[in-house]
Image: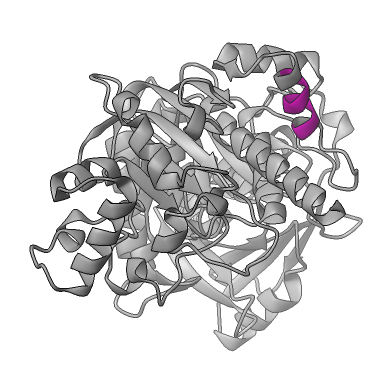
Amino acid sequence: MADSIKARNLGDEYQILFFWLKASDMLNDYSNIDKISYEDSEIRSLDDVVVSYKKPIRDMSGKPIYKEYYQVKYHVDYRDNITADNLMDPKFINASKYSFLEKVKEALPILNKSNQTGVAILVTPWSIHPDDDLAKLKIIDTKAGNFREENLFDGKKKSFVAKLRNKLKAHLGVTQDAELGEILKPIRIWGGFSQYEMLVRNLNVQFSSVGLKPFDMSQRINPYVSLLQRLFQEGITTFNKEELINICKEEGLWSGHNIMKAEENPVGIRSFLRRAENMENDTSAMTCLLDYFNGRYLKDKYRWDEEVKGATESFIREHLNEGHSYCIYLDTHSSVAFTAGFFLDSKSGVKVVPIQKGLSGREIWRPNSNVSKEQYTFWKVEHEIINENGNDIVIVIEMTHHAIDDVEEFISSNDLSVKAIIRFHFEDGPSFSSIQDGIHARYLANDISLKLNRLSKEDKKRRYHIFGSGPNGFWFFLGQLSRSFGLVTLYEYDFEISKEYYETINLP
């Protein structure tokens, strides 16, 4: 008895967490979501979470979708899978009488309503069993989770597909393939969805990017779960963006400092996939550099100075327009972040602020010169002459990791002709919390620029080799200031294999 109560409670909480996942999408400044409902009354059988769009979105076939009706089913273990039989079994969705397929059939008049077409989406951590007909006969499409009509309606009468087709028709009380097709058309199967804890962690990251306060995972009570439970008790189940923000403000869950301004457009550059899988959904324009890389490493047939730098510059010139404002996601190598800043310097006429990924999620790093410098720590600078007759200047910037030893080894191994090494570091050493926010990062970048601009006229003509470790928001700011540096060579550090630096992009 106690185990069944725990399972039911976890299922209820999982549904609430899924609501907040979709609610976070609505709170995004670029969101097309009009409102979101919890335990919606429009379709009693598909009521867990309902999302309504301002303008219809398009499914994989180009069909307009105005509403998404989610049936969210959590399971405490992996004893079973999604199968064709389970889709016809009421127990699979904890129902007493009607199966998921029967509930969709009952809801067809609403799902097919003119100019209000909807889809019914089953969300569960369970996956489709690889030995079931749904998988073996390739009935479910992996792109969107819909039934593949071209496979299910194969025109044969004695195939394995025909047996499945007849079984589905018998269960749904229809005799014609066309009738079955109409029932299955609005269905989407989202199997293998996030585990409970993974959903919690992903939500906490997403909250920061839309202005909600991340919750303290050391606490037993999740305020977002308890809030929706209380709102449901009060009969408040449907929310638009403004209503939900006001409720979160009342409950002390709204920070708002990471919200984009109305005039800002989100754009992005991606060369890493981890935690950037949905960048297309978060941006109005983006460029994906993944095809150039195997993990962190550039493929042999490509060059940093050609394809990578070229793609970055082309994206900026094409999608970031003079006189407009942007927030830029930088899920990319530090060299690319620096290069993006180089092409978006103050003379570009484009207003851009970086979105920085950190331990507490994502933050918009807005520099603000009105904030006093006194509250921040600043560089300890060491300027060491190596060879008065050397050609170049090496700049070492230590924020998150020590770098000087590896840089000196690189200089020795590559016979770099170096006049001087200028090292920027913190007295307490590097750490992942050494830079507090975007204001701090901009001040630090300014300090480096001022130091380099005070060098002698002859030194300013030398090439600067820039090594270091730190957040991409900082490298973006430094790139914006780097036009005055002259010739620049950037480097990446191989944390995984060689444990050494390698050359990447040359600017200009």
Is residue 383 one of those drawn in magenta? no
| Tally of numbered tags | 0
Residue 276, visible in the rendered structure: yes
Residue beneath the point at 22% across and 35% down: 63
Residue 228 lies in the magenta-colored region = yes
In percent of the image, x 26 and y 52: which residue is there? 169
* Residue stretch in magenta: 225-231
**Closest to the observer: 61 or 117?**
117
367 vs 78, nearest the viewer: 78
**Horizontal arrangement in the rendering, residue 266 relative to residue 406 (left or right):** left
Give me the residue at 34% from left, 66% from top: 134
Scheme of image coloration: one colour
Residue 378 on image: x %, y %: 82, 44
- Drawn side of residue 426 relative to residue 176, left or right: right
- Front-lying residue, 252 or 435: 252
Above or below, 497 against 311 in this view is below
Task: Name the dominant secondary structure of the magenta segment.
Answer: helix
Give the percent coordinates (x, y) of residue 100.
45, 46
**Above or below: residue 39 compared with residue 468:** above
- The residue located at (60%, 55%) in the rendering is 194
Estimate the x, y position of residue 326 in percent, counting from the top left.
46, 29
Asked if residue 450 can be seen in this view, the reply is no
Q: In the rendered view, tell whether residue 178 sits above or below residue 145.
A: above
Q: Is 25 in front, or is 180?
A: 180
In the figure, residue 347 lies in which quadrant? Answer: top left
Instruction: Give x and y (percent) for residue 429.
Output: 87, 60
Left or right: residue 18 compared with residue 64: right
Q: Is residue 5 above or below residue 31?
A: below
